[in-house]
Image (cartoon, rainbow, N blue to C red):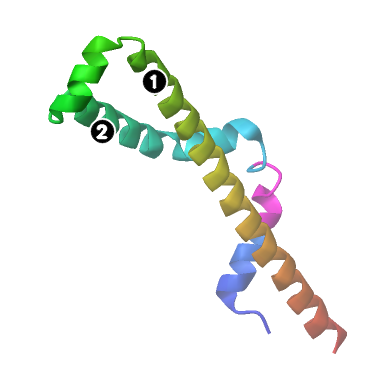
Amino acid sequence: MLTPEEEKFLHYWEEQRLHKKSFLRKFSISLPLVSLAAVVFFINFLSGWFGKADKELRRHSSLVIVILVAVIAIVVFVVIFSARHRWEQNESDYQSLLKKKENQAGR
């Protein structure tokens, strides 16, 4: 027999599974947290606490653009990967609960 919590999850995921699969929905959920991490990285990077890195940055000013592009790529990757992983976990739980419910109904 399914617990009340499992029943709630089944109903919730039946309604939300297609809605949460959309690209923009995935992208918008974890974007603020990962963007905050990127901002903290840039504050740390531009503060100049590591003198050797600061000298290299001043000598090759195009490094800022390269690092900016790399950080944006990392942010996009982490956001999409984490959202997809979360969706896959919920879908896996949903499928296993459906099978459990079908097995109980068959008895």
Q: Which residues are magenta?
A: 13-19
Quadrant containing the N terminus is bottom right
In the picture of the structure, the residue carrying the numbered disc 2 is: 40
Secondary structure of residue under mark 2: helix
Q: CA distance from mark 2 to mark 1?
A: 13 Å
Task: Say left or right for 73 vs 65.
Answer: right
Q: Percent position (x, y) of residue 73?
A: 49, 28
Task: Say left or right for 74 vs 86.
Answer: left
User: Reading the chain from its start, which is encountered first: label 2 or label 1?
Assistant: 2
Q: Is residue 103 above or below residue 58?
A: below
Q: Percent position (x, y) of residue 41?
A: 28, 32
Residue type (three-letter) at the residue carrying disc 1: Leu
In the picture of the structure, the residue carrying the numbered disc 1 is: 68
Q: Residue at x 61, y 46 (%)?
A: 84
Residue type (three-letter) at the residue carrying disc 2: Val
Q: Is residue 37 above or below residue 57?
A: below
Work out whether residue 28 or residue 78 is closer to the camera in this orientation and state it: 78
Quadrant in which residue 81 is drawn: top right
Work out whether residue 65 or residue 24 is closer to the camera in this orientation and state it: 65
Task: Say left or right for 48 vs 10.
Answer: left
Quadrant in which residue 45 is drawn: top left
Q: Is residue 6 above or below residue 26?
A: below
Q: Is residue 78 magenta?
A: no
Residue 12 seen in this snapshot: no
Secondary structure of residue under mark 1: helix
